[in-house]
Image: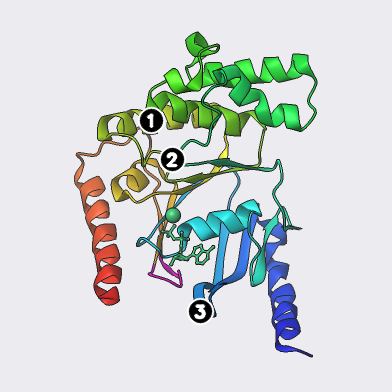
Amino acid sequence: MSQENSEDHTWRESSASCTDSHICIKDLTKVFKRDDVETVVLEGFSLDVKKGELITLVGPSGSGKTTILRLIAGLIQPTSGGVLMDGELRTSPGADRGMVFQDFALFPWRSVRKNVEFGLEIAGVPKEERRARAEKYIKLAGLEKFIDARVHELSGGMKQRVGIARALVGHPDVILMDEPFGALDAQTRNIMQVQLLNILDKTDQTIIFVTHSVDEAVFLSDRIVVLTKRPAKIKEVIEIPWPRPRDRATPEFTALRKRILTELEEENVMEN
Ligand SMILES: Nc1ncnc2c1ncn2[C@@H]1O[C@H](COP(=O)(O)OP(=O)(O)O)[C@@H](O)[C@H]1O
Ligand SMILES: [Mg+2]
């Protein structure tokens, strides 16, 4: 048996524990090869995500966070290991996983409505249903007054609310958000965090959220996964049972933020 096959075999056996979890990221290894140089970005990365959970990945820049999201989305293939949703292996993109990107990735010259409807159109959802669903999520995102505006006319925060509505309208099992508020100014970013929580309150959507901001992670998350530098390993998993909306001024909030920042600094120091 070749080495690759034996790795595959090990993974299949260990994936048995995945049958009960909503999203099971199991023993993911990803090696990028460029000009004969191999970069090991992930090495046996595993994580369980529960239904309805907002889980955040924080880690040093270049640790492999975007790679993890792209693997879950099925946009790239793992070197070994895999991602299971409700016990079934996912190897290509699908409507069960929606994405929200930092740079919005919208059609600037199309209307808000057309942007939100786009995925449904591709999926062949009939026009009436498409319209009704798009209107529901545009309203949920607080954009009903702008439904016929072209996206390029909107502010950054509004663009990202279109991105969120577009992800929600497909009724995905999980939304993958890669630094979705990273391009926004600090004040808009804080407003967006509150609005995201309001929207989630009404949908019970599972979210895997990547952010550079420890403050954002503590404000939003049910669980924070702190990653090491590349290849990303789990340094710590922190459950946050506090009710929302959370007050950034409390001693617990400040203490937790400091603790995570210290952990990340340790990783950056190790790199130098
Ligand atoms: N397609 C690719 N080819 C080669 N290297 C890549 C590719 N994509 C990402 N990488 C490398 O993988 C590492 C992790 O990248 P990424 O997942 O984007 O990190 P993060 O999102 O945590 O900043 C980086 O060193 C990056 O240069
Ligand atoms: Mg990234």
Label for residue 192?
A: 1
Q: Secondary structure at mark 2?
A: loop
Q: Give how far across and how far down residue 158 sits, in percent.
A: 43, 23
**Quadrant position of residue 189:** top left
Asked whether residue 230 is drawn in magenta, I would say yes
Res. 139 in view: yes
Res. 203 in view: no
Per the model, the C-alpha gap separating discs 1 and 3 is 40 Å
Per the model, the C-alpha gap separating discs 3 and 2 is 31 Å
Callouts 2 and 1 close, C-beta under 8 Å: yes
Q: Is residue 186 above or below residue 77?
A: above
Residue under label 3, please give it.
37
Within-10-Å neighbours for mark 2: few <14, some 14–19, many 20+: many
Residue under label 2, please give it.
180
Q: Is residue 85 left or right of residue 243?
A: right
Q: Give how far across and how far down residue 30 sits, in percent.
A: 57, 70
Q: Earlier in the sequence, mark 3 or mark 2?
A: 3
**Quadrant position of residue 1:** bottom right
Q: Secondary structure at mark 3?
A: strand
